[in-house]
Amino acid sequence: MLRNSYISETRLLDTAAKEIGARLPRRWRLLDREGDEAVRSPQDSSRRIDAIWEIRDPDGLSTDIIVEVKATPVEPRLVGSVESQLKALSDLRCRQASVNPVFMLVSTYLSPLTRERLAKAGISYADSTGNIRFTIERPAVYIETQGADRNPFRDERPLRSLKGGRAGRVVRGLLDYQTPFGTRELAAETASSPAMISRVCSLLEADEIVTKESPRGRIVSVDWETLARRWAMDYDFTASNTLTSWLEPRGTGALFARLRETGLQYSVTGSFAAYRLAPFAEPRLASLYVDDPETAAQSLGLRPADAGGNVLLVRPFDPVAFERAERDDGITYARVTQVLLDLMKGPGRGPIEAEALSGWMRDNEDRWKLSMTSTT
Amino acid sequence: METIDDQHYIDARETLLDSVEALGPHSDAVILVGAQAIYVQVEGEDDSIAVAQFTYDADLALDPDLLGDSPTLVDAMGRAGFLLYDQPGLYRRESGAQVDLLVPQAVGGPGRRAARLGVHGNRAAMKVHGLEGALVSHKLTKVSSLVPGADRSCLLKVAGPAALLVAKVHKIGERLQDPDLRRRDQLPKDAFDIYRLLRAIDTAEMVEEFRILQAHEISSPVTSEALSMFQRLFSTPSGMGTELVVRAVPSTEDLDFIAASSVALSQDLLEATT
């Protein structure tokens, strides 16, 4: 079984062909015809058949197999698009060769649900962990073998970006806590897996944003300003979160009065959260993380706004947006590190407000850096 | 409020206090209306919008039934330096400070513009259509000087928010009909005063007062008229009232928000009153 490294499409194909070939009855043959018959769509050169195999029984009865290769695990939700892709390619080829091929997907890993959906769609498959379902009517052949039910590549591929909630949680932890701390401590604090911490750190160590005392040792320094800028390359307040616009016609003052009394889970981010620490220009737009914008709007008496909204209700990219929040004057504010990121790529004056806020953070590290031992 | 017009605002309040003192013997008949009454009603409420509360005038409504005979209004005002000007009810000091004495049209007697006030004559106060609600809904309120450190105040009837809104809507409605376009210059300010009331006063409170105005024979007709005008002018983003509100606001403000909130609050009020 192949593990822990990037597997090329060619290698995946070769392995799958070998595995299937080894299980065929005697004198059956599986031939690779890609070399002489690769088909390209004339409209779009990226849409091409990855491989065409031919299966031939001892009597010479044969059929073509159109093979799609994915070097990454195929999620269940993508089965539909794989199916239509194969159909489109097959139509193209049928016009050219007037044959009726069967479909096959080869990937690094296919989960049980993905496999179930592929089988339902009549697509044969093979993954690098040994999950194979190869079924053809003419000539009749049926091969099924069981591989891994859990993705062995998970958490072990090198991380290429800080996109997504799982990386975000770790980055927030790296930003929020005073160094030094151990990987396992940080994993516990951020409800992440140690593997995820390692992956994020490996990415950041290359740029010397995070320094460890030894390859498997504690994290001894985090350059939070550079880390914030690095995260901003992959995190964008308006794109990473789900934003909805609402109106509090009596102004944000009325909203904050209601927030002081609400039992709703929320945290204020954006301009209002920054203004509290680093006053810049009088904020106008209130941005709130909430679990469910519709419910929150109803409970706060807000109404939908097409234009002129003064409240953004934001479903967060990850629950970390609520974590390590701060209470001030009866209002819950998102952690300053989260606020900083939200402003850096935020709408309006956000980037300028982020500058002012990071200035404050530079001068007041003792006021916002958390000590890992003091938190539970 | 930190605006360049602060001093004007302070001066206007002084003028008001002076005129109320001057009318002392008739104080029971006096009700504060107009912009200054609106400022008193919204004081301490959300003032995050930098639109100057700009007025020199003090508008005082009179209830003829409660007006005594002596001294005459013109004499009382004159003693405090407020001299009757070229039209009924308009009093001015040399400084330019102005006080308008007004009588709701429904109780102002016959005649076109001037109220018929017996011993006080036919020029002491002007009749105004739409002010009737002030006679029905008002509250005795302490109105204080705004001069820093001054310890000056008076107890004065102040018209209720709904009565003030009705009067402003009538004023806007009438001026929009007026062929003299100069009389429209102040309309954005008047519309914005309505917006101030909508922002500051709880809708339920306003609705309750509307019910009282609609139930009283003196104020019922003007209140119904005002609500239908209000609907036409303020209930949509393209309504003239909404446009006037936005025109009152400096372009540095969030104009879309002002328009959206004005419409939303107007619709709330209309839904609850009709």
Image (tube, grey):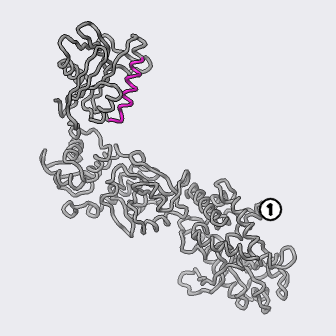
Depth check: B140 or B125 in front?
B140
On screen, residue A256 above or below B121: above
Depth check: A192 or B257 in front?
A192
Residue A320 visible in the displayed image: yes
Residue span colored magenta: A76-91
Q: Position of residue A219 (x, y in %)?
A: 17, 51
Q: Is residue A79 part of the magenta span, yes or no? A: yes
Quarter placement of the N terminus of chain B: bottom right
Q: Position of residue A7 (x, y in %)?
A: 22, 28
On screen, residue A168 above or below B17: above
Magenta stretch prevailing secondary structure: helix
Give residue B213's quadrant in the image: bottom right
Depth check: A270 or B236 in front?
B236
Give residue B85's quadrant in the image: bottom right
Q: Is residue A145 part of the magenta span, yes or no? A: no
The answer to whether B115 appears left or right of A271 in the picture is: right
Residue A157 visible in the displayed image: no
Q: Position of residue A269 (x, y in %)?
A: 39, 57
What residue did someone put label 1 on?
A: B178
Name the kind of residue labelled 1 in the image: Asp
- Residue at the image point whose x is 49% and y is 66% from the top: A253
- Residue at the image point whose x is 22% and y is 43% from the top: A199
- Residue at the image point whose x is 54% and y is 53% from the top: A305
Which SS class for mark 1?
loop
On screen, residue A297 above or below A194: below
